Image (cartoon, rainbow, N blue to C red):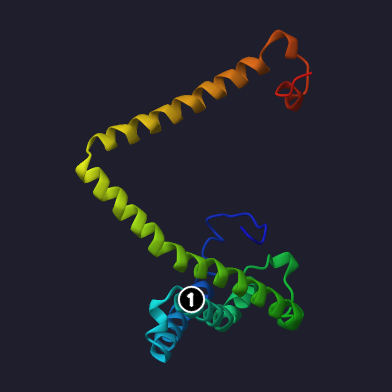
Amino acid sequence: KSMDLPITASNLYQAYLPTVLRDILYGIVRNKVMTFMIGLNPARANTNFGRFINMFTTVVAACVLSAPGNELRGYCLQPPDKRQSMVDFFQPAKFVRSTSVGAIIMAISLGVGTLATPQVEKIWATLRNYLKTNPIGYLLIVLFAVSKVLDIRREKAMLAAIANAPANKGRPADAKARPS
């Protein structure tokens, strides 16, 4: 879908093998690099900074080393009527740019996730313990969720009523929601 090509049953597995090989390589590299990074300084691996650095480095290495699989996958997904030769398709400047940008974005995302996960786990554990000692909390959560669902339904009904009001007939759809 990222290449703006239609998805059909016949082309669904067109790049299956390059995709699987790329993902296997990514997983192997990620496991090996993370093990290496933790082994360099096990004490640092238990700090927020260390977890971020280890994850960032690991993901960049895994993305860069598995990136040729992305190029092969893209080459395999070319439409037959627009197929380019290997020499024309593989352009080093575009490859380096897309690989480095993609690797940095993914590394930052997973690095931040590595920092956020322990905090979310603490909050979740606190909430779970609170709900164990205060079972009425479950009821409050359910009532809150029901309230939000009803709010959304009321808002949709109100917007539909405004759109269908006699004064709004014949006005553009975007103008119906705005006051005159």
| Disc 1 packing (10 Å; few <14; some 14–19; many ≥20) | some
From this view, report whether residue 131 is shown above or below residue 60.
Answer: above
Inspect the image, locate mark 1, and give the three-letter code of the amino acid beneath it: Phe
Q: Is residue 144 left or right of 59 when viewed as pictured?
A: left
Residue depicted at 72% across the width and 71% down the height: 83
Of 172 and 58, nearer the camera is 58
Residue at x-position 70% and y-position 80%: 96
Question: Which residue does the numbered mark 1 point to in the structure image?
Answer: 49
Q: Which residue is located at x 71 percent, y 8 percent?
A: 166
Residue 61 in the image, given as x and y percentages of width and height: 54, 83
The extreme bottom residue here reads 40
Tell me what residue is drawn at x 41 percent, y 63 percent: 117
Q: Quadrant of the C terminus?
A: top right
Locate the N terminus by quadrant.
bottom right
Residue 112 position within the rendered picture, expressed as x and y whole percent measured from the top left: 51, 66
Residue 12 picture location, percent across and down: 53, 60
Q: Secondary structure at mark 1?
A: helix
Q: Residue furthest top?
A: 166
